[in-house]
Every structure is written in C-alpha cells, then in structure tokens.
Image (cartoon, helix red, strand yellow):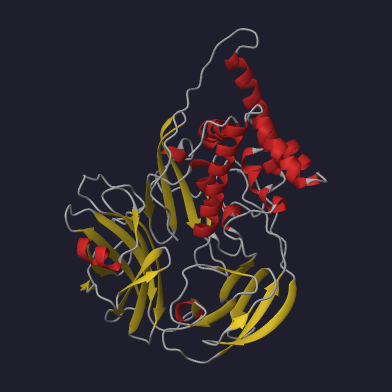
Amino acid sequence: MRIVSSLLLITLLAACSTGKQTPQSRRRESQERINAAYDARTEAQRNTPQRGPATPTGNPPAGAPAQVRPPAPVSIVDNTTTPVRTASDWAVTSIKSKFLTIDSTNARVYMDLTFQSPAGTSVISTTDFSQHFQVAYIMYPDYNNRDRLGYGNVTLNEQSVLRQGDHLRLIFDVKRPKDLSTAVLLTEVTEIGSGTKARNDLTIRFGNSQLSDRYSLFDREGQQPKLRHYVSMGDTVVIGDASNSRKQLYGIRYKHDFDAASSPMNTGARPVSRSLVMDSTLTITTNQPFVLPQEGLYYFVEDTTAASGIGLVVTDKRFPKLTRPEKLIKPVLYMSTSSEINELSQAQDTKKAFDRYWLGLMAGNQDVAKNTLRAYFNRVEEANRLFTTYKEGWKTDKGMIYIILGAPDRVQRNREREVWVYNRRANASEVNFTFTRKQNQFVEDHYELVRYMEYQPVWYPIVEAWRTGAIRE
C-alpha cells in the first residue's frame, strides 16, 4: 500500500493573550474542551495492549515523535515523496506492489503506478510511460545489508506495461538469489529527462511458505491480481495464482464491526481485543469464479489448522466511498467530542443530524461546511482505498493519521517499521509517526502506531483546524 504524493501544507498560528472573551481566549477554551472530550472518548476505544515505547535504541521517549528514525542503511525512500521538479519533468505519483511465487526459483512482481505529465495532469498512457521512464531493480539480502544479490532492467513493452482502469500495471519476473529464500527487491522508476527516481521496496519470499505468497485476489476473468484487500458484496470474485492451478480453499465469514483507531496520545494499557465469532463457512476452488453475497470479513485457508491465510473485507458497492448517512457519521469521531458522537449515533434522523453537525461547526456557513466535508471525506475515501486490511482503511492507525494530517512528506521503512515524516505541522518543524508491523493472520501489511503524549501540541491544533473549516482542499 502506498500513499498519493499531493498534500495540503497547513500553517497554524497559536496565539496567546489575556483579556475577557477575546477570540484567542475563546479558541483556547474551545481547545481545552476538545482535548478533555477527546481524551475521554479515546479512553473508551482502547483496542490492544501497547508493548512499551518501541523507540529505536538511543532515542529517548521524550520528544520521540519529532526524532525517531528507523535503522535502515539501505535507502528505501517511498515514492510518495514529492520530488523537486522542473517544467520538463514527468513524475510518478504512487506505486503499489505485490509478488506471487511461480515456483521455488521464480517470482512475478506486479506494480500499480500512477504518473503525471509536466502540466501536472494524471496520465494513463502506456506509450507515454514507456517513452519517459526507465525501470530497473536491485535485490538485497535484507534492509540492513547492501550486498547486491541481483539486478536488472525491465523492458517496457505491451507485455510488461498494461493499462488497468485509472492506473498502469507493470509486470516482471525475478529469479531467486543463490542460497537465499528471501530478498528485498528495490525497484527504481527513473524519469529519463531529469533522472528523478521513484523507489519501491518489496520483500519477496521464494518458495511456498505462505498461502498469500502464491494466491491473491484476481479480477473476475482471473487475468490480473488486484492489489487490495476488499471486494464489493455480490461481485464475482477469483482467488488465483500465476500458474492457474486448481486447489480447494476453506472460507470462514466473520460478521464483526471492528473499532476505529484510538487517539495517537493514548499510551495507557488497553484491553485485549474481543474474539471473532465465526458466522458461516464456504468452500471455493482457486482460479474459479465465485460470489460473496454478504458483507463481512472473509478468511481463506488451505486447511483449518493453517496459521495464516488470505483475508478479504466484503463491503457495500459504494466502498471506498462512504455515502450512506449511517456510515458517514462514524469517521468524524477523529475530529469530534464524545457528546457530538453520541448525538449523531442516537439521532432518529441521521441525515439531518449529520447536516446539523457540520453546519454547527462552521457557524452556519453552508459553503465552508460543504467544502470542509468534501475535503474530509475525500481523505476518508483515500484511506479506505490505501489502507484497508482486515478492517476498513479509515479505522486503521495509518488511516487515522492520513485523514487528519494528509499524506506524509516522506516515508522511511525497514522490515519491522514504517515512519511517516511530516514537515511544518502546527508548532513543530518536523513530526514523525512510527508504525510497527504486527503479525496478523488475515493480512501481511498490518501496522500499529507507536503512541506518545508528545503528539498533543501537533494533533489538537489540526483537529481544531478541521472543526473551524480552515482545511479545505
């Protein structure tokens, strides 16, 4: 999963003054009420225990959000960093990747890319991409080892570059390095005119260690894998592999409404997550179409004793958009007080309550309310598209940070963690959010935020900016 590169840079001025009911004092009082309500609400939303501060060696907890750095000697810079561009530059704006093993010595890499012309418009022409970009790759033993295990150039032609809806699909095969079953593949997409590089890293396991290394969600024709964890209710679905094999898989459906992410400042101990209750079962055959008629979390395994499998979230047909009022009211909890959430949840007419909520925040200004609502739910939609794992993307830790702060200025990553770096947010020159990879039976890309109280001076002013309509993209 990868993040779009465009983002809004927010400058907030924190004013301190004395006097009776000045605009600054009213704002300060409002902020204090928000803080208290936010803390009270997130106290009740704790999901899983936090195991220590999880800061790298040598970095003290105090001030950690602005200083944490992952130990990654191999320079893995996410493609989402906005490059310095000239008027003649074409630019890759996002990359998302996955591999499927072909056999014990070969793997096939699938990369979904978006790119822009020098005018800043999105382009999905295979010809333009082949004319303006070059693609090469290097394989390393690990993130901490620079020894080159293999490298090569990807020939860009009709077989390797395909148009897939609103993006391009790049396909190429890599061979297993001698005497190693795992390697880190670093792919560089270089703009020919300027030399600007967009990089993507992917850990590849050769062999047949996990079901998700061999099988994936495919399009309904079984031709191309979909690099996501969700499908729409009633859609024709295929779970397939690169070899078009036939294998029986067992499926379990869980009907469960997962909790949303808790506050970035919520460092206290939290209760263990509730156990999932199996709702129903099914059996499918790989590379054969089938239909999932109900919403929920589905889990497919080779046998009932398997420790890992393939998780799919089945959603309504509007997803990743949220359009129904009963679903729209839920993501606003990241910018709301507990009393506001209770009022929205208990309202008999959810649509009217939702409209009243936004108009109330924007002092009755319909234009500001409409623009702010659109900006907020554009981020919710993007979070769903980018970060859906075993639950909707807006509920994940990454989704929460993305919705409130937008895309990071740069991303640093190694095998165990991912760090989002934001420049010039609120009163901090730089702030980092560290996500640690956690084992999860449903998906591989499950990350949890390392929470710190020190996020308060950054988080609350930006929440307040949403509540006052200062953020309108």
Q: In which quarter of the image is the N terminus?
A: bottom left
The reply to whether residue 181 is visible in this rendering is no
Residue at the spot 57% in from the left edge and 78% down from the top edge: 237
Q: Which residue sits furthest top? A: 19
Q: Which residue sits furthest right? A: 348
**Can you tell which quarter of the image residue 371 is in?**
top right
The reply to whether residue 415 is visible in this rendering is yes
Q: Position of residue 169 (x, y in %)?
A: 36, 70
Q: In this view, does 302 lie above or below 470?
A: below
Q: Where is residue 238 in the image (x, y as percent from the top left)?
A: 54, 81
State the residue in front, 46 or 28. Answer: 28
Residue at the spot 65% in from the left edge and 70% down from the top edge: 233
Q: Is residue 425 above or below residue 309?
A: above
Q: Where is residue 51 in the image (x, y as percent from the top left)?
A: 57, 53
Residue at the spot 70% in from the left edge and 72% down from the top edge: 294
State the residue in front, 218 or 273. Answer: 218
Q: In this view, does 314 lie above or below 36?
A: below
Left or right relative to 179: residue 208:
right
Q: Which residue sits furthest left? A: 193
**Can you tell which quarter of the image residue 395 is in?**
bottom right
